Each structure stands twice: as structure tokens, then as C-alpha cells.
Image (tube, grey):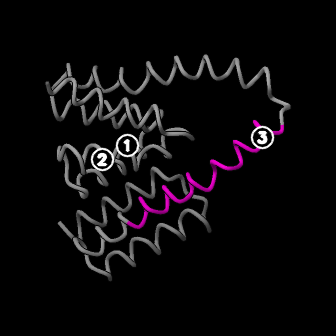
Amino acid sequence: MIYWDLFLAFFIPNIIGYGGGPAIIPLIEAEVVGRYGWMTAQTFAETLALGNALPSPIATKMAGYIGYDVAGIGGACVAVAATVIPTLLLMLGALGLLYRHRESPRVKRMSQWVRPVIAMMMAWLTLGFLLESLDSSGAIHTLIIGTAAAIALIRFKTHPAFVVIGALVYGGVFLG
């Protein structure tokens, strides 16, 4: 039964999600944290941060890690398959259809209408992480890490992986 639950937890977000890995992360969080309770919001946020520091698509890394954490190697295989196979099949079918109608005003409008939804989903996920950080680390540490991350990313164009590593070091030294 755990394999079926893992399959559904990653299959559903990947089928109904639009916009790639970052856009479906809130949907995966709703399944993993909210529906099945396999992780806390804090653990999910830490897993996401670590996954973002590594190369390759985020959705498959999250699926592999969470699947392994929940049900070992078999769970990792099921979760990654649920993430990749349906998306691949749908992408091949949709790509042919969209390519055929690429100049259609309806297709162009459809893409424009979906962008605000993705932006709001990402904002909701960010707000959840902010509230979790305020609750677990406090306002001062959250402000220090957030400000340092913003300066590193925007002003110095630091690679996000190094920003995550810096935040991990800060957390280990000051919050550990």
C-alpha cells in the first residue's frame, strides 16, 4: 500500500502541475506533508533547500529522496517513476499538439493565463517557509539569513548553491 501512496503522492502533482519542478513543489508539499504526513514542513523545507543546491531537476531529486526516506530503494524507484513517466508521456503528446498550433492566439493566451497561477503557488510556498522559519528560528535569525541571501543573490550574483551552503553553515553555528 505504501508504494501506491508514494505513486499517487508524486503522480498527481506531476499530472496537474504546470510549469516545471518549482511550480509543482507546493503540490508535492501538500501531499507529502499535508495528506500523508511523511515529513514535517520544516523537514520538507530543508530537503528542498538541499535539493536546490544540487544539480538536476528538483522534482526528481525530491521524489527520489522522499521515496527512499519513506520506503527504501523501492520507494525511491516508484516515486521517481511517478514523477518522470507520466510527465514524459504527456509532454510528448502535448508537444506535438502545441507545435501544430503554435501560432494560434488561443495557445498563446493559455500560456499567459497560467503564469499568474504559478506565481501565486510559489508565493504561497514562500510564505509557508517564511512562517516556518519565524516559528522555528526566530525573527532575528530569519532576517539575518534572508537579508544575507538576498544580498548574495542580487548584488553579488552568487550561485544559489553557495547561498544554501552559507545558510546551512549559519544554522549549524548559530542555531545548532
- Judged left or right of residue 10, residue 152 is right
Dot placed on the residue nearer the N-terminal end, 3 or 2: 2
The residue lying at 80 percent from left, 29 percent from top is 102
Type of the residue with mark 3: Lys
Q: Which of marks 3 and 1 is in front?
A: 3
Q: Give the residue pinned by disc 3.
A: 108
Q: Which quarter of the rendering shows the C terminus? A: bottom left
For the residue carrying disc 1, how many other residues have a C-alpha within 10 Å: few (<14), some (14-19), or many (20+)?
Answer: many
For the residue carrying disc 2, how many other residues have a C-alpha within 10 Å: few (<14), some (14-19), or many (20+)?
Answer: some
Type of the residue with mark 1: Gly
The residue lying at 70 percent from left, 42 percent from top is 110
Q: Which SS class for mark 3?
A: helix
Expressed as whole percent of the image width and height from the top left, the position of residue 117 reads 57, 54
Dot placed on the residue nearer the N-terminal end, 3 or 1: 1
**Cα–Cα span, label 3 and label 2:** 35 Å
Q: Give the residue pinned by disc 1.
A: 51
Q: Give the residue pinned by disc 2.
A: 47
**Cα–Cα span, label 3 and label 1:** 32 Å
Type of the residue with mark 2: Thr
Marks 1/2 in contact by CB < 8 Å: the verdict is yes
- Judged left or right of residue 42, residue 103 is right
- In the image as oriented, which residue stretches furthest toward the front? 106
**Cα–Cα span, label 1 and label 2:** 6 Å
Vertical order, 59 against 127 (above or below) = above
Expressed as whole percent of the image width and height from the top left, the position of residue 134 reads 29, 75
Expressed as whole percent of the image width and height from the top left, the position of residue 155 reads 62, 68
The residue lying at 32 percent from left, 71 percent from top is 131
Residues in magenta? 105-127
